[in-house]
Amino acid sequence: MSVIQGARERARTEVTAAIKEEARRQLASEGAARLSLRAVARELGMVSSALYRYFPSRDDLFTALIIDAYDAIGAAAEQALAASAGAAPADRWIAVCRAARDWAVDHPHEYALVYGSPVPGYGAPQDTVVPASRVGLALVAVVGDAQHDGVLGPPLGRPLAGPVRADAALLASELAPDLPVPTIAALVAAWAQVFGIVSFEVFGQFNRVVEARGPFFDQAAAALAAQVGLAPSGGPPADGQAGDGDRAGGEQRS
C-alpha cells in the first residue's frame, strides 16, 4: 500500500509541476490577466475537471506561482548572503541585491507576477507574506551582522518624522530589536529602492537611458548600502554611530 501511495504522490508532484510550468509559459505569452485554467488543461491534454483537483481555482494557481516566484528570488538572495560571509558588509549588501536583480532579469514574467501590476480580481492571501519577505530579511541580516561586528554607521538623511519613527519602531521590535530604529526606516526605504531600480530595468524604463545596466545597478546598490550605514569595503562607520539608546527597546532619538 505504501508503494502505491508513494507512486501516487510522485505522480501528483509531476502533474503539479507540469501545470505550473505551462502556466508560466502562458504568463510569458499571454500575460497574467489572461491566464486560464481551461487553457492550461487544454495544452496539457487534460480535461478541466482533472486540473481542478490540483488547483480548485485560478486564484489557487496564481497563489502557487506567486509563492514559487517569491521563494526563488528569496533563495537567490539567501545564497548570495551565505556565499559572501566574511566579506565587507557593503560588499555583502551589493551581492544580495545583485542576486535578486539577476534573478529578476532572468525571469521577467515571474518577476512581473509579484512586482508588476496587480492581477484584476486577485487578492494575495496571507500565505504569500513569508515568501515575500525573504529578500528583505537577507538585507536585514547583512545590516545585523555589521551591527554585531561594530561596523554599522548611522543612516544618512534627516531625523525621522514622528509617524515614520512609530512605524519603524514597531517593525524593529518584530524583526530586529537590536538595530537602531532609524536604521530600520532606512532599510525599508532602501529595500523599496532596490526593487524600484530592478523594475525600471525589467519593465523597460531604462531603454535608451542606461545601457551598462549591471554596473549601474551595482553602483546604485553601493549608494543604498551607504544610505543604511554600511561603509564601503569594510571602512569605519561614520561619526555618531547609533548607541544603545536608539534601539527599539531603548530611549529613541532622531
Image (tube, grey):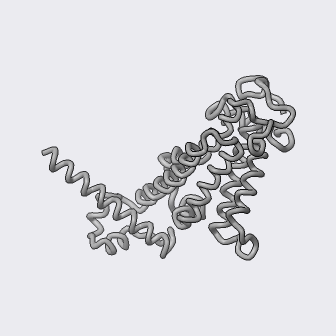
In the image, residue 172 above or below residue 55: above
Residue at 52 percent of width and 63 percent of height: 110
Residue at 60 percent of width and 63 percent of height: 116
Please state if 251 lies on the left or on the right of 64 as rendered.
right
Task: Count all numbered tags in the image, as a single digit.
Answer: 0
Residue 64 picture location, percent across and down: 43, 55
Residue at 81 percent of width and 32 percent of height: 241
Residue 152 picture location, percent across and down: 75, 35
Please state if 32 lies on the left or on the right of 18 as rendered.
right
Tell which residue pokes out farthest to the left in this image. 1
Residue at 35 percent of width and 71 percent of height: 38
Please state if 52 lies on the left or on the right of 124 as rendered.
left
Which of the 4 image quadrants contains residue 20?
Answer: bottom left
Residue 39 picture location, percent across and down: 37, 73
Which of the 4 image quadrants contains residue 242?
Answer: top right
- The C terminus lies in quadrant: top right
In the image, residue 55 above or below residue 143: below
- The N terminus lies in quadrant: top left
Residue 24 picture location, percent across and down: 44, 67
Please state if 39 lies on the left or on the right of 234 as rendered.
left
- For the residue pair 209 and 30, the one nearer the viewer reads as 209
In the image, residue 229 above or below residue 44: above
